[in-house]
Image (cartoon, rainbow, N blue to C red):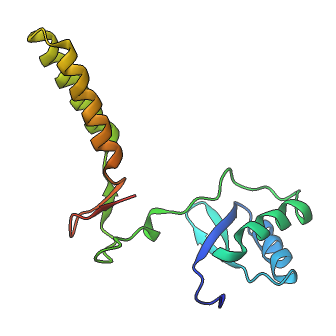
Amino acid sequence: MNAMADPLVTVTAYAAPNDAQTAQGVLDSAGIPAVIDPAPHKLRVRVPNLDALKAGDLLTVRAPGLAEIDEADEDERERVCPACGSPDVESARRAQMFGLVVTVAIAVGVAAEMIQAAFFAVAAAAVFLLIAGRWRCQSCNESWD
């Protein structure tokens, strides 16, 4: 597969520009094209997706002294809706919804003396919310994981 068509992923991030440039040099010398992408409070080292595992292993072996920032994370600006391409994406808030359903189901179950029905309502809500997507597009209302 052509490396240009392969999406870039973050393999590590550094606070110091010299560390990011050293990591980029290590990867480039091994034939893995790497770019430094500035993000707030860090410099991300990104490589083609197909080379990510090899790049991580290579940096662990050849550049163990570099001061990495906790985890290399992808930021929110890379998240776009798969249906319409809109960057207007938010979390689906499944945990908050589940908490609300549990509270209401238990309250109604206790009030109506139907604890078993409340238990089944909570179980059904859990299944439904596990099936629901983690992200939701505010433009087209699409949800996905």
At which x and y percent is residue 33?
Answer: 74, 83
Hey, which residue is sitting farthest left in the picture?
Answer: 112
Instruction: Name the residue: 22% across, 31% down.
Output: 101
Q: Position of residue 111 (x, y in %)?
A: 10, 10
The quarter holding residue 76 reads: bottom left
Q: Is 127 situated above or below 120?
A: below
Quarter containing the N terminus: bottom right
Note whether residue 48 is visible: no
Judge from the rendering whether residue 30 lies leftward or rightward of residue 144; answer left or right.
right
When the figure is inspected, residue 122 is found, relative to residue 16, above or below; the finding is above
Let me know if residue 8 appears in the view: yes
The answer to which of 133 and 86 lies nearer the viewer is 133
User: Residue at 69% of width from left, 54% of height from top?
Assistant: 69
Percent from the top left, x then y, of residue 127? 31, 39
Q: Position of residue 117 (x, y in %)?
A: 18, 20
Horizontal side, residue 50 vs residue 56: left or right: left
